């Protein structure tokens, strides 16, 4: 090949790089490893990563069962090793699957159109808000404090340099958006209200009431859904103008936080302000049905600085996992799956309430709930960790006002025995605090 | 009685309908274990929030699902089927060991909020990959949080902005060469900067005189792809850096083409202040039909205070953890820590190569691009004769005389068993054919490709209509994109 090119060595091909910058030593990185060594390395890391614990963590990342055929199908090289389907004639597999994905997301959310895809639920929510800003021509945004705290942080980052002032609306005693405060927070400059339902505490918001208040003031309602499985049994926020969803629950591994799959769904009339890729149905020269990427004039490769977003590479293969999951569970399975989640968390909340205090009981919830203990939740969790159980997420870091509260989650994979063990350990923790208190009182007497 | 037109087709090319068209009540591919807690009354628990109906969600069996997606998959082209010479996209082989290790139990099922004590494995992966990428780029620090290249660009420019703000002036604009990716200007707009175009010189590289004239104290940074989208190394890179730095500006490098540099030269050594990498290009994580990607951002020391939070730190007892107390941070750009599954795959790739392997990978990528350049020079017009690194850009100038444009040639290439190259980009070349073979292709595969391209050029001379009507061998012919955009049908609806 060198001879064909007409050079004597490969190094000659690097001549355009000025010699003074060229690296004349080996990179200081680990030496080349055999496949068996690589597998060993990651197995070792896996063992250091809690590979045999059962967990009560949710909070935007949910442990659901993943049907085996998801990985069988996405491992096909034709899906795994294809690029973005710009060349429609040889990408119909990816394109038709995205079209089906868009359809199912619409069915589940009650919206008219859905994209595929955004990076995740957090960036999806931020992009949805920017979309509302473009659609209304207004700039400020009212954000529920019951929205995932990290989603709020991401939105703050995105909003900073776009002149989008954010204000926060508190939650009431039932863990839901305080409607009175919401009413006062909306101004004629408010582009939208952003809420999450089920919200960060697992509580289902009164979407009707919130939509009415937002719309009365000419603001849009953007609803973030972080736990997609809730859609099997919880009425979707049909009154929303834009839904920003995290679809991780639908067959995507927890994977220490990613890759996940964000989706934006909205009304048909807003589609031209939507970010991200869309697949549309059309025909070929023989009139045969086929699918193409469409409405590309919204996108960065055509519009450059005037695009609706800078997004290019998205989460396509993860969207395919989501698609297969939705297809497997379908109309009946998704409902049954959601009902099991509901039953497990209702049982757990009832058990925990015997010893700790369950907060926000005044509103319906899905598969998460908040428990306050007398002992610091990190100390409670240390007790659980000894039994190979990861307890709920202590909330103080995000909500100092909630003191010793922690957010617990149960899915269909949470066993009754894990729930009973955890409840027993919470009881033990409460007893120990009582005993310690009695001892102090004893000494004081 | 005459049989109606059959719905069945040849099995190898079955007409696979939409999944909704196969659905019928009672079919199921799922099974839940018996509930080990008491059943609940959904209506009582949820009240008016209870959902009664799931609309037109499908009901199908497992074998139907397997066949549905398997048949659809056969309509896709993929790297696993042959050369995928999409310039700028770096379609290299995706090693399967990467997929295997990403699925090891504790890695696939780690929860982002599980206690640090039982997250040491994941943290070690993040730390090790970070160290490797810092060494490869010659930079000082890195964040792995951005989910893709464009997200990395945004993160990088947020840090640029925070840096300038810390000096008392955020500045107003970003300079972007006319050969840049579309994400660059779109990103600058998202971070609140105006975009000013910078023209290329006759070699296809940055016009130094223009840069000098346009550089002033309003310019926050120059976003430069190096090698640029013509596959040409910016030889005056240090002069470019000096011009920017002299006026307090920063040099941002779009690392989309880092696969031309790994192990041979480090951006940190030639004046770059901030850059992103695409793990799904240079570091072999699969494109998956459009993602997921991962877009780490490597930076020089001066930008370190502004890194997104959290950052990984080593505690005094040697264990790893996350540091959230970062008062000057630009904030979070994504929930949790980024596309962790891609970090696993990229690290496995780096381990499989080591220092020697990575250097050879780069050399092979450049060697392959030059081999294709030599093979097609004379058959296709070469608008810039500047030496080529990892990709080569031709134009359709010679074929356009017969009315055949780059997209037509690309579509004809499909009939020869190859994925098209990148068409009509970079914008500075009219009718561009942008070809990137990557290191994965053998001489034999490239010879076939060159042969196909030459054959098409001959067809253009003898029978241009065949090329104009291509592809001829696919399941569907050219699709009506105009109709799709005019009256969008974006979901299936029941009749």
Image (cartoon, rainbow, N blue to C red):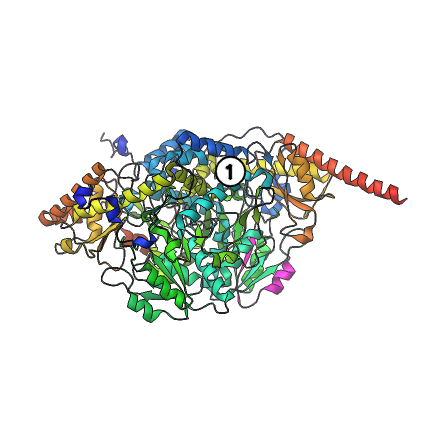
Other-residue count near label 1 (Cα within 10 Å), few / some / many at <14 / 14–19 / ≥20: many
Q: Can residue B79 be seen in this view?
A: yes
Q: Quadrant of the N terminus of chain A?
A: top left
Chain hosting mark 1: A
- Residue A164 relative to residue B289: left or right: right
- Residue A422 relative to residue B311: left or right: right
Work out whether residue B294 or residue B39 is closer to the camera in this orientation and state it. B294
The mark tally for this picture is 1
Q: What stretch is highlighted in magenta?
A: A178-197
**For mark 1, what is the residue?**
A334
Q: How far across and how far down the image is residue A378, in percent? A: 67, 43
Work out which residue is located at the far right of the displayed protein and give it: A445
Work out whether residue A190 or residue B308 is closer to the camera in this orientation and state it. B308
Taking the spot 10% from the left edge, 49% from the top edge, the residue there is B461
Taking the spot 67% from the left edge, 32% from the top edge, the residue there is A421
Work out whether residue B236 or residue A369 is closer to the camera in this orientation and state it. B236
Q: Is residue B21 visible?
A: no
Q: How far across and how far down the image is residue B248, in percent? A: 42, 67
């Amino acid at each position: 090949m060198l001879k064909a090119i007409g050079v004597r060595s490969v190094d000659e091909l690097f001549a355009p790089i000025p010699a003074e910058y060229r690296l004349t030593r080996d990179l200081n990185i680990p030496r080349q490893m055999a496949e068996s060594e690589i597998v060993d390395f990651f197995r070792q890391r896996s063992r250091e990563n809690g590979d045999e614990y059962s967990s009560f963590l949710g909070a935007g990342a949910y442990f659901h069962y993943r049907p085996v055929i998801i990985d069988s199908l996405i491992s096909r090289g034709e899906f795994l090793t294809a690029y973005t389907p710009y060349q429609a004639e040889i990408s119909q597999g990816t394109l038709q699957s995205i079209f089906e994905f868009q359809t199912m997301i619409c069915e589940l959310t009650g919206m008219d159109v859905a994209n595929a895809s955004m990076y995740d639920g957090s960036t999806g929510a931020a992009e949805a808000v920017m979309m509302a800003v473009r659609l209304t021509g207004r700039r400020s945004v009212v954000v529920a404090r019951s929205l995932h705290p990290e989603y709020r942080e991401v939105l703050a980052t995105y909003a900073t340099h776009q002149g989008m002032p954010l204000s926060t609306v508190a939650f009431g005693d039932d863990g839901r958006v305080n409607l009175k405060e919401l009413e006062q927070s909306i101004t004629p400059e408010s582009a939208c209200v952003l809420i999450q339902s089920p919200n960060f505490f697992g509580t289902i918001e009164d979407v009707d009431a919130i939509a009415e208040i937002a719309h009365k003031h000419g603001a849009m309602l953007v609803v973030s859904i972080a736990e997609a499985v809730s859609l099997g049994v919880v009425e979707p926020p049909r009154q929303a103008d834009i839904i920003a969803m995290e679809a991780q629950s639908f067959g995507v591994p927890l994977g220490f936080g990613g890759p996940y799959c964000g989706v934006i769904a909205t009304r048909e009339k807003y589609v031209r302000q939507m970010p991200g890729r869309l697949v549309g149905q059309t025909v070929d020269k023989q009139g045969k049905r086929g699918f193409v990427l469409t409405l590309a004039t919204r996108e960065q490769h055509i519009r450059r600085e005037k695009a609706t977003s800078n997004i290019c590479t998205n989460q396509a293969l993860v969207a395919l996992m989501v698609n297969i999951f939705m297809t497997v569970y379908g109309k009946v399975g998704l409902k049954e799956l959601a009902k099991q989640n509901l039953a497990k968390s209702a049982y757990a909340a009832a058990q925990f309430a015997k010893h700790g205090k369950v907060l926000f009981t005044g509103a319906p919830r899905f598969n998460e709930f908040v428990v306050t203990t007398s002992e610091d939740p990190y100390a409670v969790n240390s007790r659980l960790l000894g039994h190979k159980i990861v307890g709920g997420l202590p909330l103080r870091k995000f909500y100092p006002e909630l003191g010793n509260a922690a957010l617990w989650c149960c899915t269909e994979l949470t066993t009754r025995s894990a729930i009973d063990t955890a409840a027993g350990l919470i009881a033990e923790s409460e007893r120990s605090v009582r005993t310690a208190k009695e001892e102090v009182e004893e000494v004081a007497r | 009685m005459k049989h109606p037109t059959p719905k069945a087709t040849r099995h190898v090319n079955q007409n696979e309908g939409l999944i909704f068209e196969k659905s019928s009540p009672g079919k199921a591919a799922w099974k839940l274990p018996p509930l080990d807690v008491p059943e609940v009354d959904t209506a009582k628990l949820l009240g008016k929030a209870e959902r009664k109906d799931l609309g037109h969600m499908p009901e199908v069996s497992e074998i139907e699902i397997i066949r549905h997606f398997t048949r659809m998959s056969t309509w896709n082209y993929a790297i696993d089927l042959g050369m995928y010479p999409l310039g700028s996209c770096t379609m290299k082989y995706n090693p399967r060991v990467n997929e295997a290790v990403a699925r090891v139990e504790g890695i696939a099922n780690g929860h982002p909020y599980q206690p640090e004590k039982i997250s040491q494995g994941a943290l070690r992966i993040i730390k090790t990959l970070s160290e490797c990428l810092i060494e490869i780029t010659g930079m000082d620090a890195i964040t792995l949080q951005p989910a893709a290249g464009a997200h990395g660009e945004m993160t990088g420019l947020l840090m640029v902005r925070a840096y300038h703000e810390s000096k008392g002036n955020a500045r107003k604009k970003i300079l972007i060469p006319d050969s840049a990716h579309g994400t660059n200007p779109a990103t600058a707009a998202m971070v609140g900067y105006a975009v000013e175009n910078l023209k290329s010189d006759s070699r296809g590289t940055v016009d130094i005189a223009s840069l000098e004239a346009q550089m002033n104290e309003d310019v926050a940074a120059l976003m430069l792809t190096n090698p640029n989208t013509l596959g040409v190394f910016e030889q005056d890179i240090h002069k470019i850096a000096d011009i920017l730095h002299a006026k307090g500006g920063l040099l941002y490098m779009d690392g989309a083409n880092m696969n031309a540099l790994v192990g041979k030269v480090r951006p940190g050594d030639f004046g770059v202040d901030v850059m992103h990498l695409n793990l799904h290009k240079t570091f072999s994580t699969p494109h998956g039909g459009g993602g997921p990607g991962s877009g780490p951002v490597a930076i020089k020391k001066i930008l370190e205070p502004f890194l997104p939070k959290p950052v990984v730190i080593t505690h005094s007892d040697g264990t790893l953890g996350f540091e959230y107390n970062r008062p000057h941070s630009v904030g979070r750009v994504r929930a949790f820590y980024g596309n962790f599954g891609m970090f696993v795959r990229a690290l496995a790739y780096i381990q499989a190569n080591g220092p020697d392997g990575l250097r050879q990978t780069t050399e092979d990528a450049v060697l392959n691009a030059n081999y294709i350049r030599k093979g097609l020079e004379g058959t296709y017009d070469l608008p810039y004769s500047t030496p080529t690194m990892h990709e080569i850009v031709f134009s359709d100038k010679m074929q356009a005389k017969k009315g055949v444009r780059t997209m037509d040639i690309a579509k004809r290439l499909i009939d020869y068993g190859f994925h098209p190259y990148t068409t009509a980009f970079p914008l500075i070349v009219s009718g561009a054919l942008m070809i990137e073979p990557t290191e994965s292709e053998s001489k034999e595969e490239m010879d076939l490709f060159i042969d196909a391209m030459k054959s098409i050029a001959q067809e253009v001379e003898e029978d241009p209509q065949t090329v104009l009507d291509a592809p001829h061998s696919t399941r569907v012919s050219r699709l009506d994109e105009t109709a799709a955009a005019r009256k969008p049908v974006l979901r299936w609806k029941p009749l």
